[in-house]
Image (cartoon, rainbow, N blue to C red):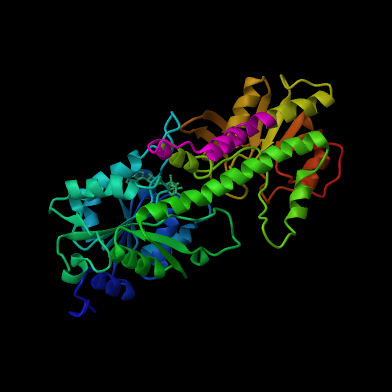
Amino acid sequence: MPPSSAADTILDQLKQKIQLRQARIGVIGLGYVGLPLALLYSEQKFQVTGFDIDARKVDTLAQGGSYIYRITAEEIQAAKAQGFSATSDYSQISDMDAIIICVPTPLNEYHEPDLSYITGTTHSIAPHLRAGQLVILESTTYPGTTEEIMVPILEKENRSGLKAARGGASSDAQKNNNPKEFLVAFSPEREDPGNTTVARRDIPKVVGGLNGQASEAACALYGAIFNRTVPVSSPAAAEMTKLLENIYRCVNIALVNELKQLSIRMGIDIWEVIDAAATKPFGFHPFYPGPGLGGHCIPVDPFYLSWKAKEFDFRTKFIELAGEINVGMPYHVIASVVNALNQKKKALNGSKVLMLGMAYKKDIDDLRESPALTIIELLQKEGADVCYNDPYFPTVGRGRKYDLQMKSTPLTNLGQYDCVLIVTDHTDYDYKKIVDESQLVVDTRNATKGIKSPKIVRC
Ligand SMILES: NC(=O)c1ccc[n+]([C@@H]2O[C@H](COP(=O)([O-])OP(=O)(O)OC[C@H]3O[C@@H](n4cnc5c(N)ncnc54)[C@H](O)[C@@H]3O)[C@@H](O)[C@H]2O)c1
């Protein structure tokens, strides 16, 4: 059924198409965020096209395969049957009604925001933009990116003199259905990889449109797959919301990492303390210490804000202090291994160390910024003979900041290692068996909780 003639504004038309599942959705960047999002829309009977510059990903999807551990080939095939396709051809952008951008936002070698993926994508979209389209950025970034970086490129480089719709809900554009406008919003991704306690649908979606129309359109689009949308006043407010959430985590993790180090000196078990504090029914949320921060978000995103803050002559001291403590954690792990071996009259230099877990957190296949990478490098630098085991990574090759070329070692003959070091607490490991068979276990995650053995050193 085509949109009715009563749908006389771009907003009405888009909302009606969404309601009728006639809106065509383009998802740009088919990684950990974009691919699941594309599949969610496909499940809801939308026609979805995924765009990615990585030809291997496009080919894998075209063959009905998956490259993300928790997404099965069957899910990809079901989406394909529903019309999902993947492409590197940006000319198909003009066929889309809504475009959602989920490309990486890393830091560069100077620890500054690297917006090249966002700008690269925006340059690619602009020539194919048409009036009435809704463009949403989901990549985590500093406040101002959508309005100051993305919108000017889209406006300058489109071929039809289109402008982003601005102004409040009563703007002329909304009244007159300006045929030369497109809609823009920012909506942060809030997924917690590996967390199965909250369904993706139940995570409220924060949305900040460039104007009221864009917010309403984006809320309608996300309302099709999320139970609740939370409109905020601007893209910058939505961008800042995501950063607040991640900085809150980063700072609180740094706090428990610092208190863990003090607790070790004082002979107190920090995990016992956190569990006890968490029984307080108000005013306390538990965060847990670990071997260092990992993942695309928590070690990276806060620095997007501290970089932007300098433009306003402002130093984000909490972020810097938290960064300092968290970055130091892999060094604390090495010192703990050295101490534990020392108790056995052994030196780290020449010792055989088996590291359990390469992923940055349990039960996921994501290596980005994993503290395990730093820990391996530090162990090797100190002369240890290191191998690793991780069911999610049979091999580890080359990344942006590492080149390990290692293979996962089978979990057999554990007695041969001077130290087994638990860096990632994957659920599949049998920790009792590991402790029983090892000479020494250094545990950075409290994975051996409840197991009593003089072989265990918790750090
Ligand atoms: N992974 C998470 O759990 C998570 C959670 C919340 C927010 N985020 C944010 O979401 C964004 C995406 O993260 P991700 O984990 O999905 O990254 P990812 O690296 O897994 O995927 C990004 C994809 O974008 C593609 N890409 C890069 N440039 C492109 C271009 N010009 N055109 C088309 N495709 C392009 C890459 O090939 C890759 O497939 C980041 O800003 C991240 O901070 C991620």
Kindly identify the residue that appears in the image at 74 percent across and 30 percent down. 336
Q: Would you place residue 144 above or below residue 233 in this image?
A: above
Residue visible at 77% across and 39% down in the picture: 263
Q: Is residue 37 above or below residue 243?
A: below
- Could you tell me which quadrant the N terminus lies in? bottom left
| The quadrant where residue 116 appears | top left
Task: Report if residue 301 is visible in the image.
Answer: yes
The rendered magenta stretch, by its main secondary structure, is classed as: helix
User: In the displayed structure, does residue 191 sit left or right of residue 382?
Assistant: left
- Percent x, y for residue 88? 29, 48
Q: Is residue 311 magenta?
A: yes
Q: Which residues are magenta?
A: 308-332
Looking at the picture, tell me which residue is in the foreground, 125 or 309.
309
> Residue 418: x, y in percent?
77, 28
Q: Residue furthest front?
A: 313
Q: Nearer the viewer, residue 195 or 62?
A: 195
- In the image, residue 2 lies in the stretch drawn in magenta: no
